[in-house]
Image (cartoon, helix red, strand yellow):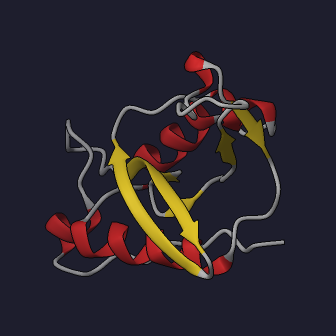
Amino acid sequence: MVIGDEVIGSYWRVAGEGNFHNNIAQGGSLCFDPVPQRAIDLVIDIALALGINHAGFDVAMVGDNPYIFEFNRLFGNHGLTVQGIDPSNKIYQYLVANTEPEQTPPKTPELATGRRRKIRPLRAA
């Protein structure tokens, strides 16, 4: 998951035996094995290229190659909260750091400054 200018967490969703669905609400389970750095790097590259500052990315590994299935601006928080990560706090911190007092809406780093933002990578274990 990317919130603001950082990858805040990652995990695997695993389908149950004989089941196609990986979604937690549809019987999938969480796995916290390390996510390969190549997958994290791909998420960072895509977020930077598209100016994304809030999304959950679905990535599959085929051998050593990561593939993006989709990204969602609305994503479940259960996998983060299980890891002790508070996404609402991360959102708040990002908005405060990127909002000037005279502005009502928060600025987006790339549009407001003309500079590319840098996402801090979550390092694989």
* Residue 101 drawn at (x, y percent): 30, 44
Tally of numbered tags: 0
Q: Which of 85/97 is in front?
A: 85
| Image quadrant in which you'd find residue 4 | bottom left
Residue 71 relative to residue 90: left or right: left
* Residue 83 drawn at (x, y percent): 80, 39
| Image quadrant in which you'd find residue 69 | bottom left
Q: Is residue 19 above or below residue 63?
A: above
* Residue 45 drawn at (x, y percent): 39, 78
Q: Residue at x 73, y 31 (%)?
A: 17
* Residue 77 drawn at (x, y percent): 59, 29
Quarter of the image with the C terminus is bottom right
Q: Which of 7/89 is in front?
A: 7
Q: Residue at x 62, y 54 (%)?
A: 8
Q: Residue at x 53, y 30 (%)?
A: 21
Pick out the residue farthest to the front: 18
Q: Is residue 16 above or below residue 27?
A: below
Q: Is residue 23 above or below residue 35?
A: above
Q: Residue at x 79, y 64 (%)?
A: 34
Q: Is residue 14 above or below residue 58?
A: above
